[in-house]
């Protein structure tokens, strides 16, 4: 089950998100649902269309199932999603 401790090992597509901080002031405050993820970008479906936000230099507030909010520094997510998931899986402490 996805939680604040293992959020980086899970798929983010489908989760609600708010850009809580960004190097570009026009990106700050964008909210919606994550519909795609690449190595360097998150695609967010907003009420005004799709916005692509760079992960680097951005901070995201993600709502997990169960209404828990998690703040994620985008720089730790700058990897292809499949590599990010497997990388954190290998580093898991038993």
Image (cartoon, rainbow, N blue to C red):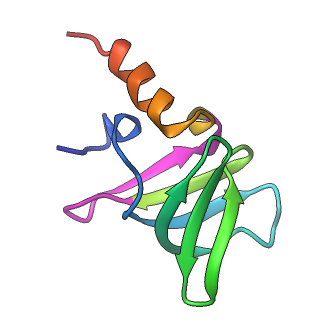
Above/below status of 67 relative to 47: above
Q: Where does the image place residue 7, in percent across and percent down from the top left?
A: 35, 41
Residue 39 appears in the picture as rendered: yes
* Left or right side of 86 for 74: right
Name the residue rendered at 33%, 21% in the picture: 89
Q: Nearer the viewer, residue 70 or 36?
A: 36
The C terminus sits in image quarter: top left
Location of residue 46 (image quadrant): bottom right
Name the residue rendered at 49%, 27% in the picture: 83
Seen as rendered, the residue at the extreme bottom is 48
* Left or right side of 84 for 27: right
Name the residue rendered at 31%, 35% in the picture: 6
Q: Where does the image place residue 74, in percent across and percent down from the top left?
A: 61, 44
* Left or right side of 79 for 56: right
Residue 70 belongs to the span the image colors magenta: yes
The N terminus sits in image quarter: top left
Location of residue 2 (image quadrant): top left
Q: Nearer the viewer, residue 48 or 6?
A: 48
Above/below status of 36 relative to 82: below
Above/below status of 64 relative to 94: below
Residue 29 appears in the picture as rendered: no
Q: Where does the image place residue 17, in percent across and percent down from the top left?
A: 48, 65
Above/below status of 94 relative to 89: above
Provide the residue span drawn in magenta. Answer: 63-75
Name the residue rendered at 41%, 58% in the picture: 13
């Amino acid at each position: 089950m996805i939680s604040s401790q293992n959020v980086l090992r899970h798929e983010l597509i489908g989760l609600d998100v708010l850009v809580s901080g960004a190097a570009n002031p026009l990106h700050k405050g964008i909210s919606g649902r994550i519909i795609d993820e690449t190595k360097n970008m998150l695609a967010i479906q907003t009420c005004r269309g799709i916005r692509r936000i760079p992960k680097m230099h951005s901070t995201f507030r993600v709502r997990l199932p169960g209404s828990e909010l998690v703040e994620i520094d985008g720089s730790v997510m700058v990897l292809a999603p499949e590599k990010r998931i497997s990388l954190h899986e290998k580093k898991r402490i038993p």
